[in-house]
Image (cartoon, helix red, strand yellow):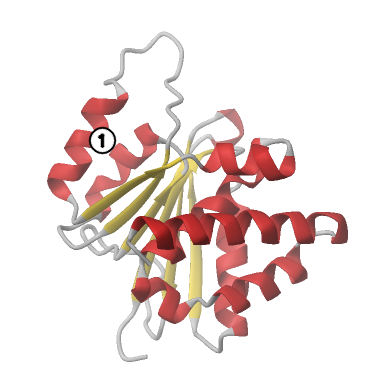
Amino acid sequence: MKSRFNLILVGVGGQGLITLGRLIGEACIRAGLNVTVAEVHGMSQRGGSVVVHVRIGEGDSPVIPVGGAHHIIAMEILEAGRSVRYANKDTVMVVNDLILPPPLAKYPGKKDVVDALKSKLGKVYLYDAEGVSKRIMGTPISSNIALLGFSIGVNPALESLISKDAVEKAIEALFKEKAVELNKKVFEEAFREGRKSIGG
């Protein structure tokens, strides 16, 4: 590929962002693509912000420039708001329909953040990734996998790089046997819901 595809993953510590970055990296390698995955941690073990930069294609810098993201996956709404500096009017954003305000702090409500995002980005999708994970896994642990499936479903440019087959092979490589089939089901259901949301 001639240009790089820039994917930002945002959330807080403990939400599976590092695992998601590894999974996408593995899927890219299996698809024969060059990929760099760079992690920027806040106080991640205490619920601080985590940003993962995934750059698919040839290039030098592992860090995505301000305004340079093609797609953003956000594990919760407030972190989606913080990530807007990486977005532009053509950026696609998929946000877990979850808000985790820290204690003793006043933060804007969900509607305010989502409205602000929609005013700045090309396409913003709110998705109940926790609901899908709980339905299939019995816990929200695979919300990150659901957001990836939904993202590939709604963004043909992303799907052209990371196919369902490549992601499923990466799941097989990275997860323990017991979790493989369930994570594949989470991914498949979220992908179908993403595709349905754009009329596919």
Quadrant of the snapshot with the N terminus: bottom left
Q: Which residue is at a point 26% across and 54% down the rendered structure image? A: 86
Quadrant of the snapshot with the C terminus: bottom left
Q: Which residue is at a point 80% across and 54% down the rendered structure image? A: 179
State whether residue 115 appears in this view: yes
Q: Which residue is at a point 22% across and 27% down the rendered structure image? A: 112
Above or below, 21 against 17 in this view is below
Q: 37 left or right of 137?
A: left
- x, y percent for residue 31: 56, 85
- x, y percent for residue 125: 33, 48
Above or below, 34 against 186 in this view is below
Q: 88 left or right of 20?
A: left
* Amino acid carrying mark 1 in the image: Val
State whether residue 17 appears in this view: no
Q: Quadrant of residue 23?
A: bottom right
> SS for tag 1?
helix
Number of numbered discs: 1
Mark 1 sits on what residue? 114
Q: 65 left or right of 14?
A: left
* Depth check, front residue: 163 or 71: 163
